[in-house]
Every structure is written in C-alpha cells, then in structure tokens.
Image (cartoon, helix red, strand yellow):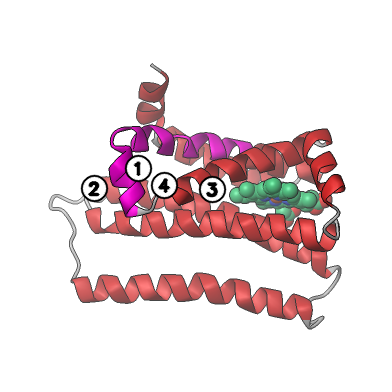
Amino acid sequence: MFIPAPQKPIRVKPRFLTLARISTHAGICLWAVCYFYQAFTGALPGDPVQALLDFTGIGALNLLLISLVVSVLSQHLKFSQLMRFRRTFGVYAAVYGLLHLSTFIAFELQFEWALVAKEIVSRPYILLGFTGLLLLLALLVTSINSIKKRMGPSWQKLHNWVYLALILVNVHFIWSTKSIDLQAIIYASLSTIVLLSKRKKIIRIFK
Ligand code: HEM
C-alpha cells in the first residue's frame, strides 16, 4: 500500500459521516438524472443510445471498483466507518448495471424480447455482462439488513462472488470494444490491483 498505515484507528464525527453519506447518494443519483436528461433532450453529441450505454456501463464499473477500494482503504487505514460507504457504492453499482441493461433493452432492442434472449445466448460478451449483473443483483438483494441477518455465515460466502463479478465485467468491457482500447486496459489494470490487494482473502476462498 502506498499510503502509510496510521498508528491509531481513524474516527470522524457521526454528523460528518451522515453529511458525507447524503452527499454520496445525491451525487450518484444526480449524475445519472442529468446524463439521462441530456440524452433525452438531444444535448449530447453523437448517438445518445451509445452515449447512455457507455455512461451506465462505465458508471457501474466505477462504482463497483470504488466499493472494493473503500473496503481495502477501510482496513488499511483502520477507518471502520468507511465500510458503510462500501454498501452504498455496491448498491449503486447494481442500480447503474440495471440502467445499462434497461438502456440496451429499451433503446437498442426496442423491447423485442425474443431478440434480447437471442443476444444474451448468442453473444458471449453480453452473456458475461449478464452473469456479472445477476451476481451484482444477488448482492444487492442480500444487502438488506433483515436478509443479511437471516443468512448468517453464508452471507459472506455469497458476497465473495463480488470478485468474480469484477472479473466478468472487465472481460465484458474488453470484449465489447472489439479492438485494443486504452480505457478498457486501464480499468483491467485497476481491477487487477484491487484483486491483488485482496489476494490473501481470495486464496482463502478457493482453499
Ligand atoms: C445484461 C447485462 C448487460 C448487457 C446486456 C450489456 C450490454 C452492453 C453493450 C451492448 C455494450 C456496448 C458495446 C458497444 O459499444 O458496442 C456494453 C458496454 C459496456 N458494458 Fe455492458 N452490459 C451488461 C452488463 C454490464 C455490467 C453489469 C457492467 C458493469 C458493472 C457493464 C459494463 C460495461 C462497460 C464498462 C462497457 C463499455 C462502455 C464503453 O465502451 O464506454 N455491462 N454493455
């Protein structure tokens, strides 16, 4: 880790934490609302459907990466309060993933359900994205406190699938570009760093 670990655990005032959480929710929601508004009013340059697919896809990946980085930082900096943000970012990663799928179904395939099914089974990169999204949705549903409590230790086992989701989504991204794309390589490199920083935990999962 490039940041030196502090001697004492970090703690901030609950009031500051609440403000930070409200700003995070507002920022992530407004970001999507403004972008969709611009797409619907023709304010975006180029093809609005492609722009929405790119925005929601990259947005979901950014949020998923941030949720994992937050957990690494929280442990390294002994800043346990940060873990509350992990769930927030993880939940929004799934929500942006759903917006991405909805954009694809509504604007690219015009709700032709037979075509949607055909795309998922016949195009491997779509199947990978779909599997990644199913995993994120399973994590989203089980992040509800009452379900988490009822699941007991199997909750952690299920939530370890987030690393597989990250890998699937990166392969989906690289494959979707159909050529060597710098942005996809940067995301794959960042994801590899995150996975390497969690290597002890990942090795334990597979033992
Ligand atoms: C059912 C699920 C999914 C479907 C049908 C789907 C579909 C697509 C499509 C059609 C594209 C555009 C390819 C092109 O430009 O020609 C794309 C790109 C992308 N998707 Fe997905 N996707 C799914 C799930 C996901 C998930 C869960 C994530 C992230 C968490 C994701 C992240 C991305 C990214 C980062 C791109 C590249 C955007 C860019 O080129 O700027 N996708 N996806």
In the image, the segment drawn in magenta is: 145-168
Residue carrying label 4: 142
| Residue 170 visible to the viewer | no
Image coordinates of residue 86 in percent, x first then y, are: 38, 54
CA gap, disc 2 and disc 1: 8 Å
Q: Are marks 2 and 1 in contact (CB under 8 Å)?
A: yes
Mark 2 burial class by Cα count in 10 Å: few <14, some 14-19, many 20+: few
CB atoms of marks 4 and 3 within 8 Å: no
Q: Name the residue under label 1.
A: 1
Three-letter amino acid code at the position of disc 3: Leu
Instruction: Mark 4 or mark 3: name the one nearer the start of the chain.
Output: 3
Q: Distance of mark 2 from mark 4, alpha carbons?
A: 32 Å
Q: Is the magenta stretch mostly helix, strand or loop?
A: helix
Instruction: Please tell me whether residue 66 belongs to the stretch shown in magenta.
Output: no
Could you say which quadrant of the image residue 55 lies in? bottom right
- Rate crowding at label 1 as few (under 14), some (14 to 19) or many (20 or more) other CA atoms within 10 Å: few
Q: Which of 186 and 79 is in front in this view?
A: 79
Residue 105 location, x and y as percent? 78, 56
Looking at the rendered structure, which numbered label has been put on residue 27?
none
Residue 97 place in picture, x, y as percent: 62, 54
Q: Where is residue 197 in the image (x, y as percent from the top left)?
A: 40, 36
Given this view, does label 1 or label 3 mark the residue nearer the observer?
3
Q: Mark 3 points at which residue?
A: 137
